[in-house]
Image (spheres, rainbow, N blue to C red):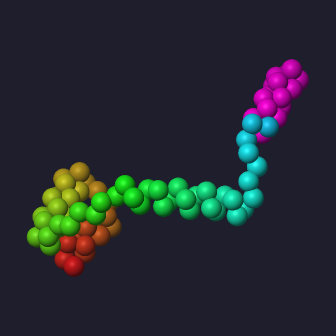
Amino acid sequence: MSNTEALQWAAEADDSLARNEILTDDEIIRTVTAEDNDDDDDVTPVKISHSEAVAALNTSLQRAEEQNFEAHKIMLLRRLRDR
């Protein structure tokens, strides 16, 4: 990297920092928490029966076996289905 390129990169970095708002730790936490709360309003829980859940796990298990998933992943699906 030439000196000219390095100076240009540094100037762009300074401009970028000047445009960004500096937040305290508490402000960051409040911002993230507020965003998380907004997402919860959009989700509507769907209730499914036990038999539908088992059928879905059986289908997933069959697909995993056909696609030669790793053994530990297949075992996890089996344990979930058996519960």
Residue 6 in sight here: no
Query: Is 45 colored magenta in this rendering?
Result: no
Asked if residue 18 lies left or right of residue 57, the reply is right
Q: Residue 11 placed where, x, y %?
A: 83, 29
Q: Residue at x 72, y 62 (%)?
A: 25
Query: Is 12 colored magenta in this rendering?
Result: yes
Quarter of the rendering occupied by the N terminus? top right
Q: Quadrant of residue 49?
A: bottom left
Q: Quadrant of residue 7?
A: top right
Q: Residue 9 placed where, x, y %?
A: 79, 28
Q: Residue 21 placed where, x, y %?
A: 73, 45
Asked if residue 52 lies left or right of residue 10, the reply is left
Q: Which residues are magenta?
A: 1-17
Q: Quadrant of residue 82?
A: bottom left
Q: Residue at x 15, y 73 (%)?
A: 50
- Per the picture, the main secondary structure of the magenta-coloured stretch is helix
Q: Residue at x 23, y 57 (%)?
A: 64
Q: Is residue 59 above or below residue 8?
A: below
Q: Residue at x 70, y 64 (%)?
A: 26
Q: Is residue 40 above or below residue 5?
A: below
Q: How many marks?
A: 0
Closer to us: 20 or 1: 20
Q: Is residue 10 above or below residue 32?
A: above
Quarter of the rendering occupied by the C terminus? bottom left
Residue 50 in sight here: yes
